[in-house]
Image (cartoon, helix red, strand yellow):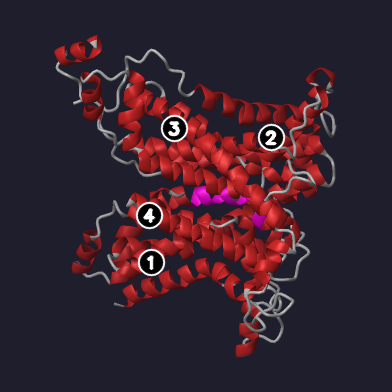
Amino acid sequence: MSTVATEAANGGEKRRFSMANIPKSWLFLPGLVWVLLGVIVPFSYLFLSSLWVERTGWLSPRDAQWTLEHYWDFITDPFLLGTLVRSLVVGFVSVLGAFLIGYPIAYYVARTRSRLALVLSTIVIFPLMVNGVIRSYGWIVLLANSGVVNESLMGIGLIDQPLKLLFNNTGATIGLIHLYTPYMVLAVMAVLSGVDASLEKAAQDLGATPFQAFLLTTLPLSLPGILAGGLLVFARSITAFTTPFILGGGTFLMPVLIQQQFMTLFRWSEGASTAIILAIASLIVMRMSRLAEPRRPTVERGA
Amino acid sequence: MVFRGVILVSAILGTIFLAAPLIVLFPSAMTAGEVLSFPPQGFSLQWYPRTFLEEGYLEPFLLSLQLAAISMVVATFIGTLVAIQLTRWEQSGRGGKFWDSYFQLPIILPQIALGVALLIIFAGIERSLGVSLRGTYHGFVFVHVAVTLPYVVGVVSGGLVNVDINIERAARDLGATEWETILHVVLPMVRPSIISGAVLAFLNSFDELVVSMFLTTPTFITLPVKLLQQVEFRNDPTIAVVGTVLIVGSVVIFTVLNAVLKTNVFASYK
């Protein structure tokens, strides 16, 4: 094996898993083609079809009449625009909820070495494995007019009428918060592990209360994680379909609108434009999330 | 220690919030009554056999299992190859970042958008070539593999980064060829990652809803799609029953995996 001999002669570079002398780079071709045919091509076609005069079903680009009206409609039609705005608002509220609920969990698990912390972290990750329909259904059981929450509140006497928590914006938002809080927890935990716990102690030594110490040292330092997690939750919230569909009743968010445009209204070109707008928005936000991630020390290549 | 106390209580409350919708399914599923209600009327396991044998959930359940198994095998195979290639390129400095993103595309792009895009394409192919794709095994496997591939690539890449070059080099010194090194030296070392990736692929295919829902036909219905269809109509405990079965199934799978692999599989599940 001449290559090994030459490597030895060169003093042996410290590279990991390097087989740079490999002639064949075809290993990833099946995967590449699969993603190409399964994702890239369909999306390209989706984009094309958003530029046609409304046509449901198949159309060859040669026969198409091109127009930008669908995108223009999005800015001018109050219903479409309203749906977009509603999605953004719900997204923001979801991030807020995920933060308020998720941060304490992340803080406790990251800072404590107890069995309870382990249990909590397992329970947090676990819902991610469960089907979206099932999770939403659990919320139906909890939030229905005769569900757990309302029955308990009325039983204690806090309210006389059941709260309408389901099949509206509120239900959808609660469901989304539940869906994406674990991601926030993970993001914050990741960044907290890099924040020195003794900073808080130092601040307390200097006279701050525990809460002030946290507020002025750990919280600002964990901001990159909060930002990255928040943007991720936002991107996922605006693109989520199952939960808003089941829990949102008639409330229209972008993904639900798209489903309607394709399956009920049969306005495929309009639906395509909605989908593209959603895709671009979520890609931008996810990119921002990636950029906000705190820099991790990378394994150095070479000596 | 007020601060500490507040944190602890918040953390526990938050966790209860996350667990509640899942926990509440169990008593709901085990009711002796005919209707979904809370509190449940009596205790009975009657709905478990009923749901699968009488209420038509068995077929979709088996279909999803089959699809997930096939997709898992294909995605793991293709994805591992991709991961090996990508890690190799990243280490020798060739544009790793671009390809990482490329192979994550199926899960970065909104599922709803992918679903409708595939609907259009499939409809078009069916029209022009006369081949049927929607509601077929090949159509669904194609889609499910595309959608689960990123998980395999991600997890296996993560495992490969930690492979020690020297072991591989030693194998080559002893005369092993390229392929032999991969098969008998490298792959066994990342076996936990490959298994984790395979399980992720399986679960994600099994739970796949949004994309599948556009490609379904009355004769080809996967479990998540069936559940979605039923959620609007049913006021009996059948959905809760299916839910508890899936939850328990996931717990069992992950517990067994954790024990067998002796690593924390949860860590790679994102």
Q: Chain of mark 4?
A: B
Residues tagged by mark 1 and mark 3 found on one chain of the structure: no
Residues tagged by mark 4 and mark 2 found on one chain of the structure: yes
Residue marked by disc 1: A119
Identify the residue at horizontal 47%, vertical 53% (top origin). A183
Residue marked by disc 2: B139
Secondary structure under the numbered disc 4 in the rendered image: helix
Q: Amino acid at mark 3?
A: Thr
Q: Chain of mark 2?
A: B
Residue marked by disc 3: B80
Asked whether residue A222 is in view, the answer is no
Q: Amino acid at mark 1?
A: Val
| Dot in front, 1 or 4 | 4
Task: Give x and y (percent) for residue B251.
Answer: 48, 60
Task: Give x and y (percent) for residue A109.
Answer: 35, 63
Secondary structure under the numbered disc 1 in the rendered image: helix
Q: Looking at the image, is B133 positioned above or below residue B212?
A: above
